[in-house]
Amino acid sequence: MAAHGAFGMLPGVDRPALAIAIPTRRRPAVLLDAGASVECRPHHLLQFAVMGSVYARVAFDIPSPRVGLLSIGHEESKGNELTREAHRLLKAAPLTFIGNVEARDVYSGEADVIVCDGFTGNVALKISEGLVEMVEELLRDELSSTITMRVGSLLTRRALRRFRRRVDYSEYGGAPLLGVAGVTIVGHGRSSAKAVRNAIAMAYRFAATDFIKRVEQEIAAAGARGPRGSTGSPRPELVEGRETRASDSLEPPAPGVGPRRREKSGAPRA
């Protein structure tokens, strides 16, 4: 919430999104939201898709990022009310939308930007972190179990080092918090010196490429504003590590979540 208080929200953006760089078989991809906004409406996912596409172009030099919607099936009719309506909005938006993406395809490289609500994204992220740690431990156990395996591990050390680099979060430094009106990089609680250095490099790249202005322009061009044309700074109902009541939100909560509260005109920008 510190970034929200310091910068406010970009005009046309109702919820912030934590964008995580993930490895795939082809090249890095972006998963968002990974925990900044748990309760989302369909137009929030459209805003996430636009912001994630700008991030993929700036960070990974992908000229036309392919956007996928994380769901339980490839068919347009699959999923819940949120994903079905978000699918309709994404299909009509000026994005390279490839449709729904199942969880098993997140790391296939089929999509460059994978969009979901913050609850789903955070669960996917934590499962992935645990899986990587388990695979590394299993490999370490197997490669040290016998003399033959130890010799083999010496011969494959270079390949193992490359594998470790491809799944190491510190290679990307941190996760940008998209949607706030200022460059914000969220670091891992156990970030190494390498991770901090790369996070600073990413923040510099965002500033040098006028990233915030590009996001604002593309949100407007995509018609991704909320149904009432939000002009800035509604507070997310849940940012990872800080819970608030749905009634505290300045944006109407998702259906069934809680009461509505009148929206304020906006928040100051830095």
Image (cartoon, rainbow, N blue to C red):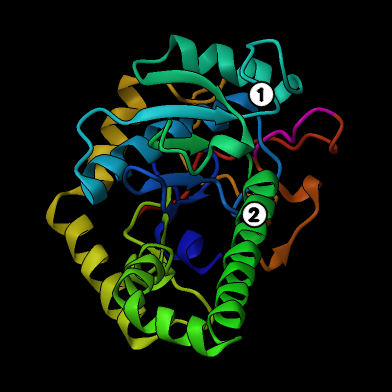
**Residue 198 lies in the magenta-colored region:** no
Please provide percent x and percent y for residue 235: 61, 50
Please give the name of the residue rendered at 57% of the width and 17% of the height, measured from the top-left corner. 87
Q: Is residue 231 visible?
A: no
Q: Which amino acid does label 1 sit on?
A: Thr
- Looking at the rendered structure, the secondary structure element under dot 2 is helix
Q: Which residues lie in the magenta part? A: 251-255
Please provide percent x and percent y for residue 109: 41, 37
Looking at the image, residue 159 lies above or below residue 19: below
Where is mark 2, residue-wise?
A: 122
Q: Classify residue 55 by image quadrant.
A: top left
Residue farthest to the front, as pictured: 148
Please provide percent x and percent y for residue 107: 49, 44
Please give the name of the residue rendered at 70% of the width and 27% of the height, measured from the top-left corner. 72
Where is mark 1, residue-wise?
A: 83
- Looking at the rendered structure, the secondary structure element under dot 1 is helix
Q: Quadrant of the N terminus?
A: bottom right
Please give the name of the residue rendered at 62% of the width and 31% of the height, measured from the top-left corner. 102
Q: Which amino acid does label 2 sit on?
A: Asn
Q: Earlier in the sequence, mark 2 or mark 1?
A: 1
